[in-house]
Amino acid sequence: TLCLGIETSCDETALALVEDGRLLTERIATQVDAHALFGGVVPELASREHLRVLAPLVDSLLEGSGRTLGEVDVVAVARGPGLLGSLLVGMSFAKGLALAAGADLVGVNHLWAHLLAPALEQDIAFPALGLLVSGGHTQTYRVDSPLAFEVLGRTLDDAAGEAFDKAAKVLNLPYPGGRIIDELAQRATPDKTIFPRPYVNNTNLDFSFSGVKTAMANYVANHPHLRADRMMSDMDELLADRGERGVLEELCIVCSSFNWCIAEALRIKVDRALEQVGKDVRSLIVAGGVAANSMIRSAMTDLAKGRGLEIILPSTRLCTDNGAMIALTGWYLHSAGYRHGMDLEAIPRGRKIPWDYCQLEI
Ligand code: ATP
Ligand code: MG
Ligand code: FE
């Protein structure tokens, strides 16, 4: 079964072809430069960019794989959560493509797709505990199979990725800031007295990152020399500028401390989730853009090792948004007999994705 996956939920236009669970080819057009000017994703701009690049990207994908549109059996598309306009562009395109190819249509939960992405690289032993840390979400899941997800804990306010991005913005680091904070953090040892570990003194499984985001803003207000005069355009410029002013070392310590307190909050809550509902769990999946973070990767690796679990960490390109994870998840759903009709609706951020598939005759 050949499945073409389409991802347009945010600022990447991404496509992939997955055949029987294996990745054949993928294409990704990132909009990061377009949004960098504004220091964040501009929804209207994102929709227009998706619309502009989707058709040529599909041509390039098919050409690169030596397949024709007629050979595609399934068109899988991210139906949410995400930016509504961006989702609508991808979904309308997917519906047209499915009709043209005579293929089945499957709408995919973008968050499930993040958690299943590593299955393209290694087998996942179920049941698994899933930590999803991305730009818009921070959640723990119990995952009993590629089709059975149960949310255990979630953020009450900001996502971990948002905290990274806002912290970077307040320091005038290059956009997008999560990866930059990671790189700076690796150059120093955290000072564990600077930022408190957010929302850990309770007994629940939820997260809260708005407090630590504000803590960083306050810290920078009290230490204004840490903030660059203008937004730095790349890492080289940042290192040169901060180095010249003699604040690079201090900046790295602050980034490391900030990264540490987020990693610790994640570690404590994942450990608690395993304790409360994961005694029979066999592996720990860490997914989403923030799963690229080195401190978080090593904290989760240690945690899994200590509990005798297999750690499942996708490679960096599978952490952030991509088409392969959508195609793979669509393939899982289709193999189990699920498909959508042409009335498939997009689900914006903040709304629960319904389980509203039709059952195929299989
Ligand atoms: P969602 O999946 O919740 O809709 P999204 O798709 O926008 O959100 P992703 O593309 O999965 O999110 O991840 C993007 C986020 O990952 C950004 O907040 C970015 O700063 C963060 N990120 C990427 N690399 C790193 C890193 N090395 N360290 C920390 N954060 C990182
Ligand atoms: Mg993104
Ligand atoms: Fe995402």
Image (cartoon, helix red, strand yellow):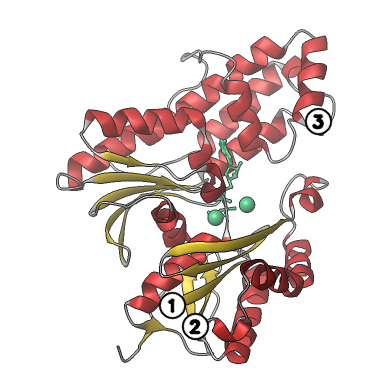
| Mark toward the start of the polypeptide (1 vs 2) | 1
Percent position of residue 356, x then y = 39, 82
Q: Residue at x 58, y 43 (%)?
A: 162
Q: Residue at x 23, y 28 (%)?
A: 306
Residue carrying label 2: 73
Q: Relative to the observer, which residue lies in front, 126 or 354?
A: 126
Q: CA distance from mark 1 to mark 2?
A: 6 Å
Residue carrying label 1: 1
Q: Dots 1 and 2: beta carbons under 8 Å?
A: yes
Residue carrying label 3: 232
Q: Dots 3 and 2: beta carbons under 8 Å?
A: no
| Callout 1 crowding tier (Cα within 10 Å): few <14, some 14–19, many ≥20 | few
> Does the beta carbon of the residue at mark 3 sit less than 8 Å from ligand 1?
no
| Callout 3 crowding tier (Cα within 10 Å): few <14, some 14–19, many ≥20 | some
Percent position of residue 51, x then y = 75, 72
Percent position of residue 127, x then y = 22, 54
- Secondary structure of the residue carrying tag 3 is loop
Task: Please tell me whether mark 3 or mark 2 is closer to you in this view.
Answer: 2
- Secondary structure of the residue carrying tag 2 is loop
